[in-house]
Amino acid sequence: MNLLEAIYNALRLPELRNKLLFTGFLLIVFRFFANISIPGPTPAALQALFGKTALLGLLDLFSGGGLSTFSVVAMGLNPYINATIIMQLMQVVSERIKEISKEGEQGRRRITRWSRYLTVALAALQAYGLTVLFQHSNPAILSPDLDWFQRGVIILTLTSGTIMLMWFGELITEHGIGNGISLIIFAGIIGRAPAALINTIQSKAGGGTIADYVPFIVFAIVALIVTAGIIEVQQAVRKVPIQSAQRVAGGSRTVQARASFLPLRVNTAGVIPIIFAISIMFFPTIIANYMAAAPTASVYYRISQWITTNFQPDGPNITMDVVYNLIYFWLVFAFTYFYTAVTFDVNDVADNLKRYSSFIPGIRPGRPTAEYLGSVMNRVTFAGGIFLGGITVILPIATSRITGIPHQQMYLGGTAILIVVGVALDTMKQLETQLIMRQYRGFIR
């Protein structure tokens, strides 16, 4: 059965068809709001800032192009993702929050509610930061003379856009197909990809000769190879053998011993480390633009100009260029370890195995099992961290040097492919599960 036949079978099922239509409708509404700009910014100044700041381009990538047009959903889901990460980190720091997260459905609802409140606070803070950035950019995108009411309206609008997307994502997850948050980011990338590709080709292939299109042919080949590699890594798992002992369940029913495995994904963290690293790397730029309003003779103004000129992935200072990319790579690598450790608690896994009379052959239950899983996960995560860092930092640099396509567009390309492929695979697996439940063959054989 091919892909089209599988889609046809999915659409024949009323329940699955309604889920697909509901998901598609909300994604269309999201793209509609992404094209509604907030009045006030100067379009030419906005494009000039995005042309020289690669990190803004990455933030724009996650908002589906909403930031480059200063739309209602300009901040995308970045505040919500950061809030979710912070709440997961709090479960490690605070025993009380960790206990609450284990209280079943009621505990998860409390954690979700706190994540929403934190999202509102982070969205308002980020909206304020963007407003300050756009007021003090050169040239200024927003009027430097905005009063507090005008600034408050912009902050309220941007915050409301993020809350709306958070709501859409939760609705899709609950009533649609796939992970709603991931699908919104996916739809944003797909929605702006054609225009971005056309603009890049027109800017680099103005002469119209065959030689002008050679870099894009090379890029297409690299993109295909990278896509194949991402698919392999995204689906790669380290299978840890698990042996279940025979036990009595329910007082009389005997559960026979059986052998299985515990799958440890190579890239457990997904794109979360990239998003978190971007948020940190973008912070100095916001501070620099805020200090740009200082007198030109002050030390604050000189620091602002130095950061704006040098703290970017392809700046004029080669040494700072290398330092910047090394910091970016290290942040992605470190957050891969950090987020994996937060989401995959080896002690909890070891306790669950012991509780269900399961064990790893040759490893004693309890603490030895946790230590063994920790050592295996460290090696697996090392490969995942190198992979993410390579896709987001090393690959764009290498491809840009080979093809001559601007560094900023390469940054967007590698990260976009990673997100699109990862979300597509996860969504296909969920749809496959729905089809298998109804005795249909799925997408992935």
Image (cartoon, rainbow, N blue to C red):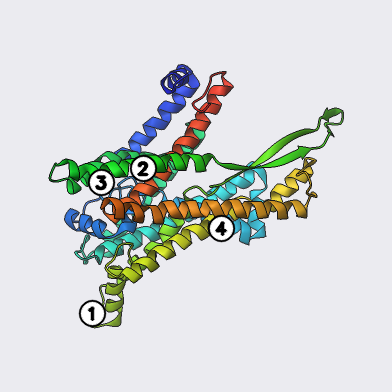
Which residue is at the far front? Answer: 211
User: How many residues crowd around disc 3 within 10 Å: few (fewer than 14), some, or many (20 or more)?
Assistant: some
Which residue is at the far left? Answer: 207
Instruction: For marks 3 and 4, give the one nearer the viewer.
Output: 3
Helix, strand or loop for disc 4:
helix
Residue at mark 4 to residue at mark 1: CA–CA distance: 41 Å
User: How many residues crowd around disc 1 within 10 Å: few (fewer than 14), some, or many (20 or more)?
Assistant: few
Callout 2, which amino acid?
Ala
Q: Which residue is mark 1?
A: 295
x, y percent for residue 426:
50, 36
User: How many residues crowd around disc 4 within 10 Å: few (fewer than 14), some, or many (20 or more)?
Assistant: some
Instruction: For marks 4 and 1, give the one nearer the viewer.
Output: 4
Callout 3, which amino acid?
Pro
Earlier-in-chain disc, 2 versus 3: 3
| Residue at the spot 14% in from the left edge and 46% down from the top edge | 206
Q: Which residue is mark 4?
A: 338
Q: Which mark is residue 215?
A: 3
* Quadrant in which residue 149 is drawn: bottom left
Earlier-in-chain disc, 1 versus 3: 3
Earlier-in-chain disc, 2 versus 1: 2
